[in-house]
Image: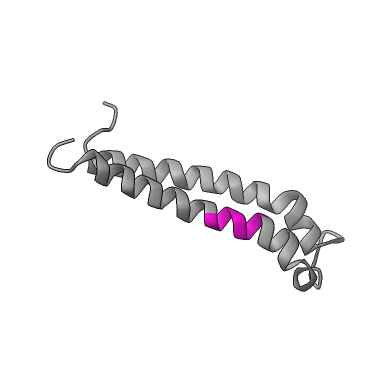
Amino acid sequence: MTNRSPQQYWRENIRYLILLLIIWFIASYGAGILFVEQLNQVQIGGFKLGFWFAQQGSIYVFIILIYVYVQLMNKLDRKYDVHEE
């Protein structure tokens, strides 16, 4: 790390983690449990949307969040010059 401190690096890393975990919570717990009645008004492939989110949707969101996290961390590593060559 050149001019920036390791504390700044980890502060940004933790900020990314918290944001992505909040998104995952909303997708899994919120859409699968809290908002299930509103989502059940819509059907996908014969299944109610609330059921779909509880069974499938949160997994897809999690996989997308992993990809987003990797991209964010690659960008952060380059910013703080700690990336692999």
Would residue 17 appear left or right of 26 to someone viewing this image? left
Q: Quadrant of the N terminus?
A: top left
Which colour assignment does the render follow? Answer: one colour
The residue most toward the left is 3
What residue do we see at 67% from left, 62% from top?
30
Quadrant assignment, res 79? top left
Q: Position of residue 69 (x, y in %)?
A: 45, 45
Quadrant assignment, res 85? top left
What residue do we see at 52% from left, 43% from top?
66
Question: From what the image shows, is residue 84 above or below residue 34?
Answer: above
What residue do we see at 17% from left, 43% from top?
4
Count of marks placed on residues = 0
Would residue 60 appear left or right of 16 to someone viewing this image? right
What residue do we see at 77% from left, 66% from top?
36
The residue most toward the top is 85
Question: From what the image shows, is residue 54 above or below residue 74?
Answer: below
Is 71 within the magenta? no
* Main secondary structure of the magenta stretch: helix
The residue closer to the viewer here, 53 or 4, is: 4
Q: Position of residue 78 (x, y in %)?
A: 26, 40
Q: Which residue range is magenta in the image?
A: 22-28
Would residue 21 appear left or right of 46 to someone viewing this image? left
The residue most toward the right is 46
Would residue 43 appear left or right of 32 to someone viewing this image? right
Question: From what the image shows, is residue 53 above or below residue 74?
Answer: below
Q: Position of residue 67 (x, y in %)?
A: 49, 43
